[in-house]
Image: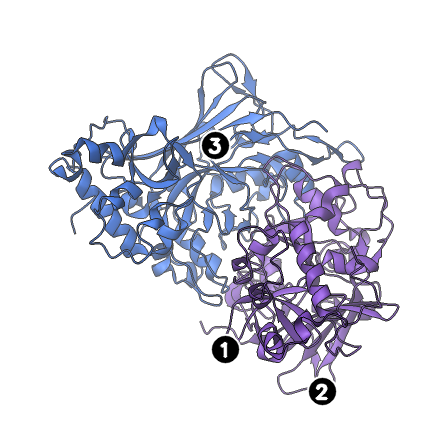
Chain colours: A blue, B purple
């Protein structure tokens, strides 16, 4: 098989060097326009390649994609396509790469074919790429867990005793995962300040973002089965940017003893493009050392982290954008492989379309923290914005945008962005 | 509309007075046999009424069930049927009641029709009735929360400060919800005894059940919408028995600070029949008094609890069964209406097929506790079984069976049972 990640590959489509979507990326998503869709698509430069149209022209006919072809490309989510299995995703990605190569005239020689198969991203409405079957949110950045422990528990013992032994995580709410661009309404909820006797119900005063990545499960398991760490990545289809919006005041009042609930479930945002693990292969790196050594079922000898540069920007309603944080997914203490193996270690069955978020990705420096809670250190050091205002937490009208990309040797593989604007709370 | 709950109603099918499924109940489920299915069905005495067969004979043709008829009755779950909406469920339940009434010859006058429409329950394999979209487990028994707080935290302050203000709950794992009769494999996992330095990985030594009820959402909401308490029950289709299997040693090591995770996600069992809220109407009761008064969004003036008698039995591999607990769903401090309203109070969207479990239903007396943890009080007072053995927690080969029914004025509305047998852990 040709190396689809070869930096020398070129497309007949003109792709700016700063694009997140060169021919080496080819992430999958779901889109619609006024005239078509929802169809599955692949991002290429400033275009979407319409996979349903490509299939209709017969370009996938010799691939072994089963009886659901071409209907599988005319769906509201990637789930059915992903369920075809890794050989199918790889065959489609390879064929798309071939069709887009600079020396292949199959698509590019016919204006009619091109018009059917290519849609400008500016004309496409992106849908939530995955129907999330189950959603787990991990807590795998040691810097983030330490920061939160310092603020809310004991600065001298910020990390809880289990943290270095377990990829701590909790089940999140799948229904409220939305695609980038969806507005997020400030939640109402119960919150109680330490100095008052009783809680009150009203708009959260501590609305926050959390900078995360999430992976999508591409291969399920039966109840009772477990996944050894060496096979964990076989179960991963790809990754998305993930904003785990959080209401800190609701969360801190409700979370003992059963964990976060309504402080999170009002909305989580994902980027529209799922970048395959295959496309990220050149950016594999070792994570930080783990001390003590994990128990044998979590031991990993090969690098299972990925060097993905991340940033978060806040744009006030009538102001310009300020980048408030720059972090990196390669910093994560627990890898995706360890998370997935842990999740299945008790026999819990995985399903195609499961979403597993990383937890907030914070670095060691003050400008690499992945939440307002940490950036403004519980409100004690407000974050200045370019328009002269400052933030302890998010205000109504603020737009939060997260971006991520890998870059090495002139090759850039990007995720695009996940963005959302805060709407005022419902009136009571 | 006729009163479908009238105790005087009789069927032409001979139904023993101790049956859970008289003509006043008519719970919905999904079944298959060697020859047919999966089809939706209704339990009646010792039979299943095959709704797909009934539809094929045209008995639903004059009902307004939409274009998915009769396919909606030939499905692997009730979800699509439930999504038709309350008028459709009620129309079907009313028609089924009419067809089964002692004075209606429509079904009973033809052997051929009867043979197509009725299946013995002993010949039907019941499937999981619901594809759970999202699963929340509440913690709404004040006795259970107090007991757990006494054992694990502070006996003098057993209830946490938020408990009387919030129907505390957490997101659970939807994928591992299984139907009654499914064996449950003892999970492996990390656990750490207080007196050792580091955790080990192996079979849970503290496998437990939790006696719960769960309701199924029948009407969803849009993200950002909330459900006032007075409308909460409009969103409930019906109830099931629920066994929230728990591994206490895994749970106690992992659950701080984000809540239960792998100590629960290895399996949860539901009864195969979903009893509609309509069928339970005669058994509505007020719950215990709430002090302090809940915040206005959770205030309820009418009775929202249901008097459902519950029991748990353990049967060792080669022994007879012992009933170890008798409790009642009417005891719950927080009602289902309060749970649902709270769940949606931050704008979290509900989906048809959501499952909301009550939390362990413990009474005030030692023989009404809903888990082994409480019955054997953390292993300090082992529970004697009829075969002379005793239990601190569950052993391999133990079968746990939960049963539930309402009874008043000679009318009995039952749930059947939810049962499961513990299999040995996977070898490491």
Q: Which residue matches tag 2?
A: B387
- Could you say which quadrant of the image residue A288 lies in? top left
The chain holding disc 1 is B
Q: Earlier in the sequence, mark 2 or mark 1?
A: 1
Q: In front: A109, or A300?
A: A109
Nearest to the eye among marks 3 and 2: give it.
2
Residue drawn 54% across the image and 35% down it: A245
Q: Which residue matches tag 1?
A: B34
Q: From the viewer's perspective, tell me whether residue A316 is left or right of residue B120.
A: left
Q: In this rendering, is residue A334 above or below A193? A: below
Instruction: Look at the numbered disc 3 and give the secondary structure of its residue.
Output: loop
Residue B318 in percent (x, y) is at: 63, 87
Residue A217 in percent (x, y) is at: 41, 52
The chain holding disc 3 is A
Circle 3/circle 2 CB separation < 8 Å? no
Mark 2 residue crowding within 10 angstroms, few (<14) / some (14–19) / many (20+) = few
Distance from disc 1 to disc 3, alpha carbons, whole Å, reads 59 Å
Q: Are marks 3 and 2 on the same chain?
A: no
Label placed on residue B127:
none
Nearest to the eye among marks 2 and 1: give it.
1
**Quarter holding the C terminus of chain A?**
top right
Distance from disc 3 to disc 2, alpha carbons, whole Å, reads 60 Å
């Amino acid at each position: 098989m040709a190396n689809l990640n070869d930096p020398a590959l070129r497309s007949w489509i003109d792709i700016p060097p700063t694009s997140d979507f060169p021919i080496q990326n080819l992430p999958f998503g779901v889109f619609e326009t006024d005239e078509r869709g929802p169809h599955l698509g692949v991002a290429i430069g400033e275009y979407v390649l319409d996979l349903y149209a490509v299939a209709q022209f017969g370009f996938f006919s010799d691939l072994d994609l089963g009886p659901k072809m071409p209907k599988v490309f005319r769906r509201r989510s990637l789930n059915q396509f992903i369920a075809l299995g890794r050989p199918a995703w790889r065959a489609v990605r390879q064929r798309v790469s071939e069709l887009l190569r600079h020396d292949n005239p199959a698509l590019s020689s016919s204006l009619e074919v091109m018009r059917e198969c290519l849609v400008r991203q500016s004309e496409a409405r992106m849908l939530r790429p995955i129907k999330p079957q189950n959603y787990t949110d991990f807590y795998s950045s040691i810097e983030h867990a330490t920061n939160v422990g310092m603020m809310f528990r004991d600065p001298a013992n910020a990390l809880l005793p289990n943290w270095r032994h377990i990829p701590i995580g909790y089940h999140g709410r799948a229904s409220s995962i939305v695609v980038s661009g969806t507005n997020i309404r400030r939640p109402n909820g119960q919150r109680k300040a330490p100095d008052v006797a009783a809680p009150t119900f009203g708009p959260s005063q501590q609305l926050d973002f959390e900078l995360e990545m999430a992976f999508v499960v591409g291969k399920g398991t039966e109840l009772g089965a477990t996944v050894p760490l060496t096979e964990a990545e076989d179960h991963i289809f790809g990754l998305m940017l993930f904003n785990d919006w959080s209401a800190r005041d609701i969360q801190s009042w409700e979370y003992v003893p059963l964990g976060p609930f309504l402080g999170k479930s009002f909305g989580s945002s994902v980027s529209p493009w799922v970048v395959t693990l295959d496309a990220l292969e050149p950016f594999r790196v070792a994570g930080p050392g783990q001390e003590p050594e994990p128990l044998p079922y979590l031991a990993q000898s090969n690098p299972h982290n990925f060097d993905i540069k991340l940033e978060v920007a806040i744009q006030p309603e009538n102001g310009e954008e300020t980048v408030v944080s720059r972090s990196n997914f390669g910093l994560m203490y627990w890898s995706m492989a360890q998370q997935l193996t842990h999740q299945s270690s008790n026999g819990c069955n995985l399903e195609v379309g499961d979403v597993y978020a990383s937890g907030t990705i914070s670095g060691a420096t003050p400008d690499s923290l992945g939440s307002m809670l940490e950036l403004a250190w519980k409100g004690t050091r407000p974050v200045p914005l370019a328009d002269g205002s400052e933030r302890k937490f998010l205000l109504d009208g603020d737009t939060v945008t997260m971006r991520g990309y890998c870059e090495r040797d002139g090759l850039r593989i990007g995720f695009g962005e996940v963005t959302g604007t805060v709407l005022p709370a419902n009136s009571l």
